[in-house]
Amino acid sequence: MLMDSAPPQEPAPPGAAGSAVYFDGASSRRHLVTLAFKDRLELDEAAEPTIAWSYDDIRRADGPPGVLRLRCLTALALARLEIRDAAAASQLISRCARLDEHAPGRHGVGAIIGWSLAAAASIVAVIVFGVPLAADRLTPLVPQALERRLGDAADVQVKAIFGDKICDGAAGRQAFGKLVDRLREAAGLDNSVLASMLATPVPNAFALPGGRIYLFSGLLAKAESPDEIAGVLAHELGHLRHRDATRNLIYNGGTSFLIGLLFGDITGSGALIFASRTLVSSSYSREAEQDADSFAIEIMHRLGRSPKGLGELLFRVTGKEGDRNLSILANHPLTEDRLARMRAEDRPPSGPPLLTDGEWLALKTACG
Ligand SMILES: [Zn+2]
């Protein structure tokens, strides 16, 4: 259930809304694409994965008269979209509130100066204390707006790697939303959490900056009870709460990323592409995993449910053949002591089931 975009100002016509030419920024090939005005602008080309641009990230690029030429902050720097159809162009312009936002405004300059000072201070910190401590000090300084932007960019990367098929079974989505809401409320987190289910056989779940959480159907398929999935989601909420993905990014990017932030355009696509790749592929430290487990154990106990299922589910994934590189264990390494701890925290249920049997069945089958 993606809830991240404001609804379009006017209802989008069903289906195709115009055609355009897309240059991917990596080759000189012209791609003939069909535009669809969904919660993001979607570029569809026969037999190619759909490309989606957030309206807020779309900017006008210089173009000849009669052609609306656009770039996107989260796409490759040279990627361009050219629209000649005036109706489609005006539809798109009405949705892109920041189309002509080239130079940073006063607020933007202030943020960049503040951020640059933080980055400069942190480079000194890296030299004096080493990277891990600097990452700890810098993470709380990262503005929420930048975290959201990193999350948006990484979302594009997630969908490029794992496919962009969002599970859309209505009853399943409703059950998923209920589960996320119960956990979120028990955790005292606000409703800026964007949780979604993706249909991919990879057994994984993870959190990205900006409040994004993903559950893959491959993990859902291996789960045997709502408490197992609840435990995983609570663990991911723990990573969100502790801003672990952002910390990982600074840690893995080290000084080069900080220097890039300092001297480059902080919202430039190069930094975002680096960031999104790192976010999807990196694994958490032992301490971050333990802290996210503590968070999950507390939330599950607060709801009167056992956190044991989280360990059981992860253990079940370990036992299976398959590509561990992409599985939940790649991002969240499972150790004997983690498993032992979740088992030790087992309690008989004292709260009502988190989902009814019917809701659980709907969730299990939400991805088809
Ligand atoms: Zn984890």
Image (tube, helix red, strand yellow):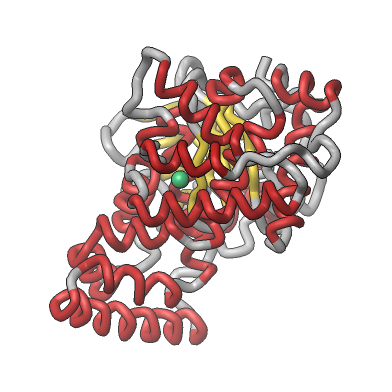
Q: Position of residue 145 (x, y in %)?
A: 53, 68
The front one of 255 and 53 is 255
Of residues 115 and 13, the one nearer the viewer is 115
Residue found at x 33% / y 52%: 285
Quadrant in which the C terminus appears = top right
Q: Above or below — where is 337 with respect to 136? A: above
Q: Could you tell me which residue is drawn at 46 percent across and 23 percent down?
A: 317
Instruction: Answer with left or right where residue 44 lies relative to residue 275.
Output: right
Ligand 1 lies in quarter: top left
Q: Position of residue 180 (x, y in %)?
A: 71, 44
The answer to whether residue 63 shows anywhere in this view is no
Residue 353 left/right relative to 294: right
What residue is shown at x 52% (from left), y 66% (from top)?
A: 100
Please tell me in which quadrant of the rendered image residue 363 appears: top right
Can you say whether 312 is above or below 187 in the image? Answer: above
Q: Position of residue 201 (x, y in %)?
A: 50, 18
